[in-house]
Amino acid sequence: MRQVYLDYSATTPVKKEVLDVMLPYFSEKYGNPSSLYTLGQESKDAITKARGQVASLINADPAEVFFTAGGTESDNWALFGAVDALKKKGNHIITTKIEHHAILHSCEFLEKHGCDVTYLDIDCEGRVNVEDLEAAITDKTILISVMFLNNEIGTVQPIKEIGEIAKKHGILFHTDGVQALGNIPIDLKSLNVDLLSMSSHKIYGPKGVGALYVKKGVKISNYIHGGAQEIKRRAGTENLPGIVGFGKAAELAKENFDSHVKHCSDLRNYFVDKVLNNIPNTYLNATMDGRHPGNANITFEFVEGEAMLLSLDMQGISVSTGSACSSASLVPSHVLTALGIPVEKIHGTLRFTFGDFTTKEDVDYTLEALTNIVNKLRQISPVSSEKGW
Ligand SMILES: *Cc1c(COP(=O)(O)O)cnc(C)c1O
């Protein structure tokens, strides 16, 4: 059976070029980067190279990039590190209702420990209103954390404007850049971003490795305590093969940026067009304007997302309902809820995300399967028969 993977925002396969550069670091070049003999220094040099590769993708200085165990750790570090460093100044954080759980659940934890958190709404296009954001600022506000690009609906937030507001008020600005990395241009020399989270496995690198960009001069407390690794900012023996792989993945993402964006958006646009025209009662959620090139988030009325997902899976097609994190439960996606979509429609919503290995044949195969599945499910759906289907 054909296998079609349309869940690139959940994770991506490791590219062969990435795996190739990683392999020697498992069993030949295994030296501890903190060791002073040659084998250790070679490992240290490999990390230095990877730091440069990641920094180059976001137009930062290598000294501003600190490797972590992934996007989740980077998000946790940014929040906890900023709150601890600024506790004398205040205890108020501004974020949004559509953040990844790595931010939302960290904020909930911080609320239990004395922080006040404002969760901003988004408009019907999926964007935060910068005037609402500025109005939420108090003299106790120490941190703004607004994601660069949303993982479910693919919308890009007004990061430049938010950075200017943060700077004007002297507030730290963190952005979760995990989905933005490699998918839209990130130029940190032209944005007032203080902290930016990244993850390797969303850009064709290995899982379990990421980075936090900390702008020069920005002081946040450490989060992982121990040895002197990462210029004494993040302890623990480095995930050497992972970091080397992340570096290579970042280099490839920079090199192939234009063709990646074109490839994904061509297939995505073709798919969205066909679905909306060929399957009645379907809607694309959030704006197409400034969106993740490979994201399509579509509501199919009168059908259960779970039933569609399982039927597609039986035909070898992998997609997600709402978001990967809520896929095991029927709790409606917090992002789609914030977008104002009613619960019954959220339950009929699928996220398709296209990537470098998606082909036109994959998309055609999916379109055919999807059309049949939706028709079949609607015939047996009690909701659709009530509506006269
Ligand atoms: C995947 C993701 C994360 C978590 O990154 P991990 O490396 O899987 O821990 C955080 N934020 C966003 C927006 C993501 O898509």
Image (cartoon, rainbow, N blue to C red):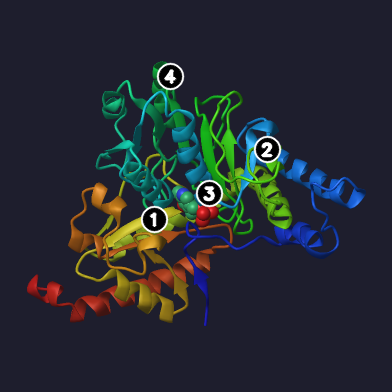
SS for dot 1: strand
How many residues crowd mark 4 within 10 Å: few (<14), some (14–19), many (20+)? few
Tell me the number on the disc at residue 170.
Answer: 4
Residue 123, located in which quarter of the rendered image? top left
Label 1 vs 3, first from the N-terminus: 3
Q: Where is residue 191 shown, x and y percent of the image?
A: 51, 26
Q: Is mark 2 within 8 Å of ligand 1?
A: no
Residue 183 visible, this angle: no
Q: Position of residue 328 (x, y in %)?
A: 36, 69
The percent coordinates of residue 77 (x first, y second) are 51, 42
Is the CB–ligand 1 distance for label 3 below 8 Å? Answer: yes
Instruction: Identify the residue at the far right of this view.
Output: 38
Badge number at residue 296: 1
Position of 103 relative to 308 (above/below): above
Circle number at residue 73: 3
Task: Name the front one of labels 1 and 3.
Answer: 3
Mark 3 to mark 2: distance in Å?
16 Å
| Front: mark 2 or 4 | 2
Q: Amino acid at mark 2?
A: Lys
C-alpha separation, residue under disc 4 versus residue under disc 1: 37 Å
Q: Quadrant of residue 221?
A: top right
* Residue at the image point whose x is 25% and y is 71% from the top: 304
Q: Earlier in the sequence, mark 3 or mark 4?
A: 3
Residue at screen point 47% across, 77% down: 316
Q: Which callout, 1 or 2, points at the residue further toward the start of the chain? A: 2
| Kind of residue at badge 1 | Ala
